Image (cartoon, coloured by chain):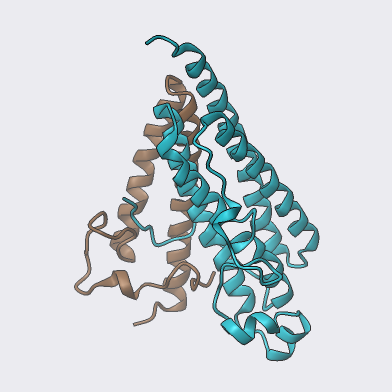
Amino acid sequence: MEATGMDNRRMAQMLLQIQQLEFTALELNLFLDTHPDDQQALAMFNKVHQDLMQCIRNYEQFCGPLLNFGFSPALQNTWKWAELPWPWELKY
Amino acid sequence: MWIYEKKLQIPVRVSGPNPRLAKEVLTQYGGPEGELSASLRYLNMRYSMPTSRAKAVLTDIGTEELAHMEIVGTVVYKLLEGASIEAIKAAGLDGHYATHDSALFWSDPNGVPWTAAYVSATGDPVADLHENLAAEQKARAVYENLICLSDDPCVTDVLRYLREREVVHFQRFGETLMQVQECMSQKRFY
């Protein structure tokens, strides 16, 4: 089953939140690679990590797995991993 | 080990089919300063780095470059989606179409295929980190050329984002170079 227009919008919206948080985490990650003792950056990284994990869990509930190889659960009664639109196919 | 995350790093939209712009953006897919060159250069260079921090920076930036390769691939894919044969011919993309249809391929806009010769690895950490600094500046310059060429504001947004990332990577590689030089000037006891 293809995601409907409404599902697609909701999915894109949930992904946007994940994209924003993950970008913040990535930036802090690169910064920490060269500034490993920056306590403020470490605290921000851990805060963003928590928010990011929460958003990913919500996405997995509503849409399906975000990650492969066991890093996302299969919460639906079918293998949603293959079914959800691929990143280059997603319509916004 | 890498895990796939079924999303792009940023949302990618295009205003409509635009084979001319697809042809130009292709340079950041399979051209000399493109994202394939960048990701492979950094991930390959990790093995000969002297410090753990340098290995971390190369792993993390190399991984982000793989995500950028997927963004560039998506831009090209979406710009070709629904393009007519007439538009493909008018854009000078008929040579690509003859061999690849609308498939992506590792080449620059003139059809020159990607080669490992775009990537340097001397095994000398100072020389290799300078290579990375130069690579980030060259990629920034190419994104600025593409921004000048772009007539699609949605694609321009993506190009501006990718340009900005090169600036951040340059900064991190600069810090890494200083730390590696410091480490190498200290380790002289046997």
Is residue B71 shown above or below B39?
below
- Where residue B90 appears, as percent x and y from the top left, is 78, 84
Q: In this figure, what is the number of numbered marks?
A: 0
- Give the x, y percent position of residue B161: 63, 50
Q: Position of residue B105 (x, y in %)?
A: 56, 72
Chain B rendered in what hue?
cyan
Judging depth in this view, the residue of B110 and A30 nearest the camera is: B110
Is any part of residue B2 visible from this angle?
yes
Quarter of the figure that contains the C terminus of chain B: top left
The colour assigned to chain A within the rendered structure: brown
Please name the residue shown 66% across and 68% down the image. Answer: B112
Q: Where residue B142 sits: x, y (%)?
A: 72, 53
Left or right: A10, with B84 as reference point:
left
Going 75% across and 80% down the picture, which residue do you hit?
B92
Instruction: Residue A67: name its quadrant.
Output: bottom left
Task: In the displayed orientation, state which residue is furthest to the front.
Answer: B190
Q: Is residue B54 above or below residue B167?
A: above
